[in-house]
Amino acid sequence: MKVILKEDVPNLGLMGEIVNVRPGYARNYLIPRGLAVEANPRNIKQLEHYRREIERKVKKLKNVAEDLAERLSRTQVVIKTKAGEEDKLFGSVTTIDIERHLRQIGFDIDRKKILLQEPIKRLGQYRVKVKVHPDVTAEIGVVVEREE
């Protein structure tokens, strides 16, 4: 029996796939739990429409993310902090600090999307990656200066 999966099912397939299963498995497990629907012409047509809608939404979100990434790439964050001898910071600059400074200049970026390998512990200029979409990454400039 052919069914269309409404959700990802381990060891069977991903959401939106048409898979062939035994009739009892479909009738007694997949369909009652809302994991699948029978693959009849009406449901297949509905699935195609649903896929097209999802593709449009994904494309739109990616375009928005690319615009945001372009604006972020032109952004430079200046963080002033206390530093000791040899330009070593008292403490460090973390993703939380970068997030706070991005918010001040109008970007609402979650700190978990800021890809900082390790906290910044010296004065200087750095390039930090920001993942704005699963397929789109921007790189911002971070300048750490001595607080006067």
Image (tube, helix red, strand yellow):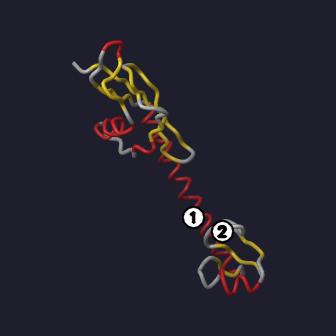
Foreground label between 2 and 1: 2
- Residue 21 shown left or right of residue 80 in the figure: right
Tags 2 and 1 touching, CB below 8 Å: no
For the point 64% across and 83% down, the residue is 31
- From the viewer's perspective, is residue 52 above or below residue 113? below
Q: Nearer the viewer, residue 53 or 114?
A: 114
Residue 140 on image: x %, y %: 44, 31
- Residue 4 shown left or right of residue 57 in the figure: right
Q: Earlier in the sequence, mark 2 or mark 1?
A: 2
Image-quadrant location for residue 84: top left
C-alpha separation, residue under disc 2 versus residue under disc 1: 13 Å
Specify the quadrant that holds the N terminus. bottom right
From the image, tell me which residue sits under label 1. 53
Specify the quadrant that holds the C terminus. top left
For the point 74% across and 86% down, the residue is 24
At mark 2, the secondary structure is: loop
Q: Residues within 10 Å of mark 1 (few under 14, many from 20)?
A: few
Q: Residues within 10 Å of mark 2 (few under 14, many from 20)?
A: some
For the point 43% across and 36% down, the residue is 71
For the point 32% across and 28% down, the residue is 91
From the image, tell me which residue sits under label 2. 16
Q: Amino acid at mark 2?
A: Gly
Image-quadrant location for residue 50: bottom right
At mark 1, the secondary structure is: helix
Q: Amino acid at mark 1?
A: Glu
